[in-house]
Image (cartoon, rainbow, N blue to C red):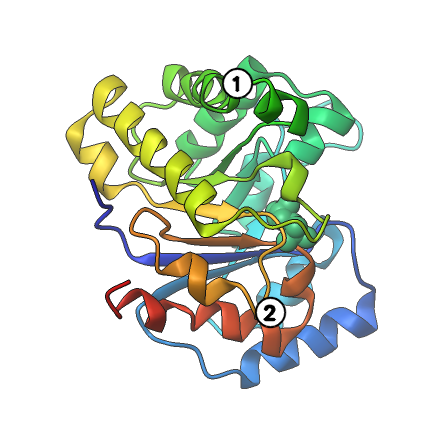
Amino acid sequence: MTGTGKFFVGGNWKANGNKESVKKLVQELNDAKLEEDVDVVVSPPYIYLDSVLNTLTKRIEVSAQNSWVGKGGAFTGEISAEQLKDLGVQWVILGHSERRHIIGEANEFIGKKAAYALENGLKVIACIGELLEEREAGKTTEVCFTQLKAFADAVPSWKDVVIAYEPVWAIGTGKVATPQQAQDVHSEIRKWLAENVSAEASSQTRIIYGGSVNAANSAELAKQEDIDGFLVGGASLKGPDFATIVNSVTSKKVPA
Ligand SMILES: O=C[C@H](O)COP(=O)(O)O
């Protein structure tokens, strides 16, 4: 089984940066030479979204790192999907492991967020992935499928959803999954989509990998048939490194 979707690379800046470093990063991205056949998205912290939208090349789309579960209102500290849309934001990352495991967001809540974001015209980067102890207990696919099902139960369509498989043990640790480890899970996710959603969702939904992706390891990962791109954390804070990861799409074209 192989996906047919366009290669996709997202840069999740998390809660990093300040006005000066964001300006520098935007400049680096504007100067970068990016392969054409890749969807490129960056995700700055909320407070920099507006300035990034106003200064970043339109070649690159912009994502929020979270959004509120429903209509905006009396929810102190939250940002609604309507507000993100109003600003011109095109994407939102939902279900990131840092929000699941540090903030405590649950599957059903995340699924509702995805449905509400889609309903309001945002595209969704839906994150799933297992903890180290879950992998060691042989529960990787069980955990991923449970998280996937929560999205599937809530969203009306997968057309505007990209799935990011991010094993938690690989995030920010420098311990990247091997290309084979990532490929095995991606292939299981694609099979799950075929069996539980539709053949169309299975072939067309991009399944991207996240977890210690960098400029040195992205080409090998990109060669795997079910890896349709990346969600990059730390390495997305350096424009030239992020551009190298985007351009690893060229190794996809070389038969592995
Ligand atoms: O959203 C991105 C992931 O959490 C990966 O982060 P990382 O590349 O710093 O490991």
Q: Ligand 1 closer than 8 Å to the CB at disc 2?
A: no
- Under circle 2, the secondary element is helix
Q: Ligand 1 closer than 8 Å to the CB at disc 1?
A: no
Q: Which mark is residue 173?
A: none
Q: Residue at x 37, y 23 (%)?
A: 155
Q: Residue at x 24, y 46 (%)?
A: 3
Q: Which mark is residue 139?
A: 1
Task: Assess whether mark 2 and mark 1 are in contact (beta carbons under 8 angstroms).
Answer: no
Q: Amino acid at mark 1?
A: Lys
Residue 220 spot, x, y in % from top left: 43, 62
Distance, label 1 to label 2, CA atoms, is 44 Å
Q: Amino acid at mark 2?
A: Asn
Q: Is residue 73 above or below residue 49?
A: above
Q: Nearer the viewer, residue 245 or 106?
A: 245
Q: Is residue 129 above or below residue 45?
A: above
Q: Residue at x 30, y 69 (%)?
A: 37
Residue neighbourhood size for the residue with mark 2, other residues' Cα within 10 Å, grouped as few (<14), some (14–19), many (≥20): few
